[in-house]
Image: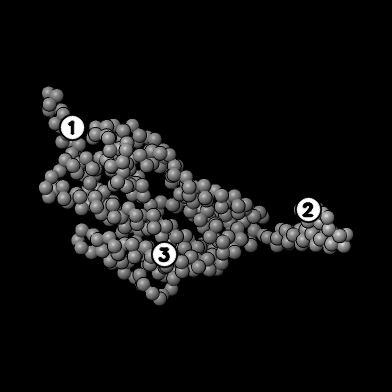
């Protein structure tokens, strides 16, 4: 670089540029040496401790053993998309059975990725606010590599079966609704419309859940590290604004009983204040938000699933009696 800059310049300019580059190199070397001399195992947050915290990624998560579709991926509109809309009930059930083992393995992989994402989210939040990390006794982790890994994990949709199973379930529920008539059909349509209304809000509430988890782990860190508490307060201030924006969307969703989704959720967070109060206290007051939202979503899905099971049992019984 220096050779390119000084090429064709007068000798006096060449000397000046060369001296300037030499000073910069010496300064860079001095800073690197200073960092090595002053970095110690006690001067940063242990990356491995953050990884261990990520291991409780499902303490507020989603059960995967109740046969209901993943609410983060369930989209009622998939029932009308190809190839799912061309399948009849028997084909749907057969495909669900064929893909069950592959889905289970993919789901376990997704859980491990979520755990790693949570650990990286904590680590990078600290780094972004000037808190150093350590990896081992006296080593600084490669922050660029951690950022790259976090981006790759975020962008990875996982195996296609993770999206296929919820899509098959959506088609299954649509077929079950089509078999009902009158008041039963309208009741099911109410649940179906609710799930459609909740779908656009799902990414935002998941983001709030993850940020709230991160704030809680930093604010109540086992080391009583005030640097981590400071980062928690910085994140908590942003959390409140994100929550306000998300609740504006929730206010547009009308629940079957006539209440808005915003009012229904706020009723389950009685200590949440719109303005004022300690930021971290308000994040803690918002903790019931995700379980309540998830309960509402899964209650609607469970109602559809129960009807689908009844429809399939009746169809199986009819087929059996006709075969006799």
Q: Residue at x 25, y 48 (%)?
A: 302
Which residue shows up at 47% across the image and 63% down it? Answer: 215
According to the picture, the residue beneath numbered tag 1 turns out to be 316
Q: Gap in Å between the C-alphas at discs 2 and 1? A: 81 Å
Residue sitting nearer the eye, 162 or 7: 7
Name the residue at 42% across, 67% down. Answer: 241
At x 41% / y 70%, what residue is drawn?
281
Dot 2 corresponds to which residue?
A: 4
Along the polypeptide, which appears first: circle 2 or circle 3? 2
Q: Nearer the viewer, residue 65 or 259?
A: 259
Whether residue 152 can be seen here? yes
Q: Position of residue 79 (x, y in %)?
A: 28, 42
Q: Earlier in the sequence, mark 3 or mark 1?
A: 3
Q: Secondary structure at mark 2?
A: helix
SS assignment at label 3: helix
Q: CA distance from mark 2 to mark 3?
A: 49 Å
285 horizontally vs 29: left or right:
left
Q: Which residue is mark 3?
A: 242
């Amino acid at each position: 670089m220096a050779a390119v800059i000084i090429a064709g310049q007068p000798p006096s300019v060449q000397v000046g540029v060369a001296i300037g580059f030499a000073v910069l190199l010496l300064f860079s070397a001095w800073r690197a040496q200073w960092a090595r001399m002053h970095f110690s195992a006690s001067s940063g947050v242990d990356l491995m401790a953050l990884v261990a915290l990520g291991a409780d990624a499902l303490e507020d998560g989603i059960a995967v053993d109740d046969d209901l579709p993943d609410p983060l991926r369930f989209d009622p509109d998939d029932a009308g998309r190809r190839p799912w809309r061309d399948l009849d009930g028997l084909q749907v059930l057969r495909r669900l059975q064929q893909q069950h083992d592959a889905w289970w393995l993919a789901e376990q992989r997704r859980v491990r990725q979520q755990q790693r994402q949570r650990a990286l989210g904590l680590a990078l939040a600290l780094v972004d606010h000037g808190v150093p990390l350590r990896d081992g006794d006296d080593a600084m982790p490669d922050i660029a590599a951690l950022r790259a890994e976090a981006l790759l994990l975020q962008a990875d949709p996982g195996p296609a079966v993770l999206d296929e199973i919820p899509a098959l379930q959506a088609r299954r529920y649509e077929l079950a609704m089509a078999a009902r008539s009158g008041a039963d059909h309208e009741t099911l349509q109410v649940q179906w419309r609710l799930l459609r209304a909740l779908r656009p809000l799902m990414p935002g509430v998941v983001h709030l859940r993850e940020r709230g988890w991160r704030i809680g782990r930093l604010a109540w860190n086992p080391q009583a590290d005030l640097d981590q508490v400071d980062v928690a307060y910085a994140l908590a201030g942003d959390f409140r604004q994100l929550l306000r924006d998300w609740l504006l969307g929730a206010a547009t969703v009308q629940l079957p009983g006539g209440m808005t989704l915003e009012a229904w959720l706020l009723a389950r967070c009685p200590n949440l204040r719109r303005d004022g109060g300690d930021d971290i206290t308000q994040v803690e007051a918002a903790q019931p938000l995700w379980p309540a939202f998830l309960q509402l979503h899964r209650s609607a899905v469970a109602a559809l699933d129960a009807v689908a099971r009844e429809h399939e049992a009746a169809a199986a019984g009819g087929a059996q009696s006709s075969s006799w």
